[in-house]
Amino acid sequence: MPPTTHTKQEEDAFMTDLFAGLNDSFFDSCPEPSPVRPSHSASTTRAAKPTTQATPSKPKIAKPMLRVAKTPSKALSKKANAPCKEEDVDMAFLADGLASWDDMEGDLMTPKKEKKAVTRMLPSTSSDSVRETCTRCIVDQIEEKALTVIAVETKDRRTVILEDDWYRTDIRLGDVINTIGPFSPASTSSLLTIHITNNSNLLIHHPDILLTATAISNAPKCRRKPLLTNLVRSIFSSTPTIDDKGVERKGDGSSPALVWGNMLHEVMQSCLKEGKWEDDWIDKCIMEKVGSVNGLGELVRIGVGVEEAVREVKERAKGLKGFGERYVGDVPKEVGVLVNTRSKGVENSMLAIRKLEDVEEDILSPSYGLRGKLDASVQAVIQDRNVVSTTKKSGPANKNSNVKLGASSNRTPTLAPPTTQTHTLAPFEIKTGRSIAGLEHRAQTMLYTLLMEERYGEKVESGLLYYTQSEEVVRVPRARNEVRALIGVRNEMAGFLGRGRGKGKGQLGEDKGKGKEEMGEEEKRFLPETIDDEWVCGKCYVVDTCMLYRKAVENVFDDSSPIANIYALKTGHLTPSQGEFFKKWEELISIEEQDAVRFKKELWTMGAKEREDRGRCFGDMVLDEGFVEREEEKETRRESKIHQFTYRFVRRRGGEEGSLLNGHMSCGDAINVSVEPDLLALARGFIVELTPTEVVVGVDHEIRLEMIRKRVGLWDEGDDIFGGGRGKGGGELVFRIDKDEMFAGMGRIRDNLAHLFYAQGDTRRLHLVVDLAPPRFFDIDPSPSPSSDCETSAAIAKFSKGLNGDQLGAMNKVLAAQDYACILGMPGTGKTTVIAAIIKVLVELGKSVLLTSYTHSAVDTILGKLAGKEEDGDVGFGILRLGNVDKVHPDVRRFTLEARKPATTIQQLEHQIMTPPIVATTCLSIDHTSARKGGLDVSLFRRLSEAHPEAVVDLTHQYRMNADIMLLSNKLIYGDRLRCGSEEVRRRALVLPERRVVEDSHAQTACGKDDCWLNQLMSESCKAVFVDTDLVPARDSRIGDLVQNEIEANLVYQVTEALLKGGVSQDQIGIISLYRQQIKLIGNLLKERKEVEILTADKSQGRDKDCVVISMVRSNDDGQIGDLVRDWRRMNVSFTRAKSKLIIFGSRSTLQATPLLSQFFQLMDGQGWILRLPANAHEMHAPVLRKTSMKRSVEELDKVVVLKENVVGSGRPMKKMKKGKAEEGLLKGRPILKDLVNDGR
Ligand code: SF4
Ligand SMILES: [Zn+2]
């Protein structure tokens, strides 16, 4: 059905849906479309609702609710967005309260001190631009329809009057709103005032929630559906065209029609890009798309061959050549008809597409709270002319109907000569389906005009829709009424998203005092109600998810609504405990998600400098135009959808700004590139290389400087003098590169979770994981011969050489498992070895194996063990390593799809994908304190092994730690299950070959004692020790949110130097800290000692060192231990990296205050393993070991050279530490595995 055949009734129905719940005043006040409200919408007329509706429909929009935020004045005094010069930035203010993520749990909107604010980000009052005036405000007072707000930028109080339909917007105290339109002085009030009415201005509620244009345009039918789609994102919907284009997908999203549609999109985009429309070229594009690895992948999924695919796409691409002929060029041609379905009079226009600006532009608009991905952004020329007369009479009844000038037209209009010619920017949307959803397309396109206008800073008054099947181009003029209605829908949806879930986090500046428990059901609701339309719901593609939420999360029991049957069909199988399980985990995922949401909005609410201070941005960057990418690099990203272009950015001021290595961004991290304030996330991608002054990124969009200059008003065409404007830095374009917080999102995780609970879901896994059904094992005799089956025995014999008893036991357990078996591989027990052996046996037996872990390094270590070195020849069986090539270890990159010869046929691709018996990839992990507390850190391993200890087999013999170090981890983590693999391991000690040198050096120091702290630490008998710095002035300090402890760093440095002087080699020593800034400090002190590894707790995984020195950093009067609370167990695991000596530096008084750590101190005390440093410990051995001035900056420290050698003195071994019976430790009263951490992270 072509778009132009929408009836008047259909259009009205659409508008009625759009305006559902809005005040009737709308219909009184708007001249068009017709105010006639049909009694039924187009969809509902097909299946009238039974009258026995269980839940009578309620008004969709509630009256404004007056609720008093507990800390309104605080929440309202946010100063963050006011413009100010860089030198105004008050570092202390910025750093204050940001010491750790834990501190950031609080409301970011609440400043700790009344201080100056930082760089303005939101586009606002700028006279040089067509961008609408946007004012970010926080609601301070609500009185009937008048809101008193605080303008965030200027900090003054203003009045917002909500009139007409806006009156019903559900605004609450503390909410963030944007007003679009100018404020002006009012006669009735001393405050600047804006009236938001049906005819002027707009209100954006919760503008930081960016809803996609697609979601909004799909909302008229059902508001709930787009929100669910957003929440639970199917894996297959990640294909951009499906994801954002609102194309309805069937089940897993892979319908042939969609695949053809997506390919056609890409083909047409290629034509637009190249400006080529000949048959040969189009055929070539089709072959390329179909034959690309991605294309073939799609075909494998839908089970269609290449030939058929080519035929299908060609069939659909038939009109492209004609499109090129009719519409592409500098001036409109007679045949380039542009249809306007809403034109008032009878008029007709012609179109020429003059220039392509971009394809797949992903535009974020924090002004409108919108985002969208445009198929194409074009420069168009439109020629309008009026039709003088037609052969049919026109009257009121068909005044809105279309004039169609295609071949099939039955009208014969007489055209007047061309009148006006307009050059304009326009979003260009390609629609490949039969356009039954044409009206939704219009809504979407209209929203795109807003987005484009904001990004380009030029007027965009209408959008273009191209229907490939009817070969028509439709003009969609932006209409105030529709935009207003769409924004109303947006606000309603954002209202749902902004409450309920946002609660307790202060995320949106709302009432954060109220806990979830205290909220009423209505307040907790974060999804609109079901529409209860049997026909619509019956064919809805998210019906499974919808019903699952209805039952498990919303606790609705439905046996009488029109969709009761559907409800029963979809949820009848779920038990109450299964529902509870889903609800709990769904909530935990949302908590986890909130961090990402909060960080994400920093892109527009926080200036680059401020965000850089928090470690999540590189500000002040300029493009290095001389950069040329290496050829090999190009090769590896051949098929990458994201990594299309590679750029190098450098610091504008040559690095004065500080090292890029500071902060939380590193190689492989997802990023986006922006120019403040309007061009947000111009390009997205990954960090490919990072040095202190340069960053190389791989991104999805081309960064064209001239174009950007033009858009930010920095440079007009033909001008070589840089004009004033934004993004300017001495004539240069200044970029910011931000960590992209929502790159992956949690949609897939939710989707995976939900799949367990669907009616056609994974019931076996549901029983095993949720119901904890006992796992089944084949009955095999575990020893001496594990199996009576010869083949199995032979395979075991072949690959089990060198395994110990534990390891063989583990292998047998796995082979006997029908469902699962858990191997508890404690550190140093040879997990990697046994996993590799088991995989080999399984493959030998013809099984397929999925190898996964939270970290790339863990996966790649095992692959490395399996495969051996590349030079040593092939592995003998196939491995497919999935994942971002940039993150895969170079040694195993040859197993990625990218490293193979690109498949050219489905058979080849299938061979590459389906034949390798081993598929290896990472899985996701969770990292949020609240979510952890709620139980999100309960690994599957822990859940299963606690429920079914019979499924667990231990590897208990470790070959790494000596008895003391093992004791520590046995008590703290492993419940006394670890054993030393041999006597030699048990007695292991670090002997300093040149101990005398250290002792002798004392003569020249202030120390002069034999049993000084340093000598005690050097002693062979000192194998595990906590070095208490309480008496030393070793206090933590902050740089932004980064924490460090300079004196402790120096103590660590001294110990390390002493060890090295004593003859320990550099590679025997590892230094670990949770704090990156501390690592940088220590790294700088030890920069001459390149082989000493200085690592974060995470990075230390998989390593072992004879001596490990740990710096706990935290030392303060408030008992602030920040990250440690979260990472204590990870820290424990890093203790197990030490083979012979473990030295832990920290402040006992600070750390002990936390119950979690007090148990650690009990243990250390009991063993007599605490060494209290004297007050001058850090100075005692000066000048021999101490670097000079503590207060100097890291840069200065670089220049200081230390160390005098050959100092004479004497020493005596450290006095024997008191041994006591160890406490039961942290695991007292807990299940053995409770604290098992994912060793291998
Ligand atoms: S099943 Fe019905 S109520 Fe649920 S999302 Fe789909 S259309 Fe909306
Ligand atoms: Zn000494």
Image (cartoon, helix red, strand yellow):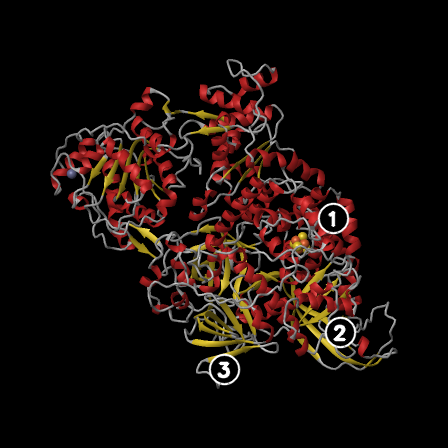
Q: Is residue 344 left or right of residue 1081?
A: right
Please tell me whether mark 2 sits on a helix, a strand or a loop.
strand
Quarter of the image for residue 157 reads bottom left
Quarter of the image for residue 876 reads top right
User: Mark 1: which amino acid?
Assistant: Pro
Please tell me whether mark 3 sits on a helix, a strand or a loop.
strand
In the figure, 714 relative to 1127: above or below?
Answer: below
Residue at 34 percent across and 59 percent down: it is: 95
Quarter of the image for residue 776 reads top right
Q: Which residue position holds label 3?
A: 184
In the figure, 1195 relative to 833: above or below?
Answer: below
User: Mark 2: which amino acid?
Assistant: Met
Q: Quadrant of the C terminus?
A: top left
Q: Quadrant of ligand 2?
A: top left
Judged by depth in the image, the label closer to the viewer, 3 or 2, is 3
How far is mark 1 from mark 2, CA to CA?
Answer: 34 Å
Q: Are marks 3 and 2 in contact (CB under 8 Å)?
A: no
Does the image show residue 868? yes
Q: Is residue 1079 left or right of residue 943?
A: left
Residue 976 percent across, percent down from the top left = 36, 27
Q: Quadrant of the N terminus?
A: bottom right
Q: Are marks 1 and 3 in contact (CB under 8 Å)?
A: no
How far is mark 3 from mark 2, CA to CA?
Answer: 41 Å
Residue at 53 percent across and 41 percent down: it is: 923
Q: Which residue position holds label 1?
A: 256
Residue at 45 percent across and 45 percent down: it is: 934
Q: Which residue position holds label 2?
A: 350
Please tell me whether mark 1 sits on a helix, a strand or a loop.
helix
Structural crowding at the residue carrying mark 3, measured as other residues with C-alpha within 10 Å and reported as few (<14), some (14–19) or many (≥20):
few
How far is mark 1 from mark 3, CA to CA?
Answer: 55 Å
Residue 996 percent across, percent down from the top left = 17, 31
Which one is nearer the viewer's eye here, 1200 or 584?
584
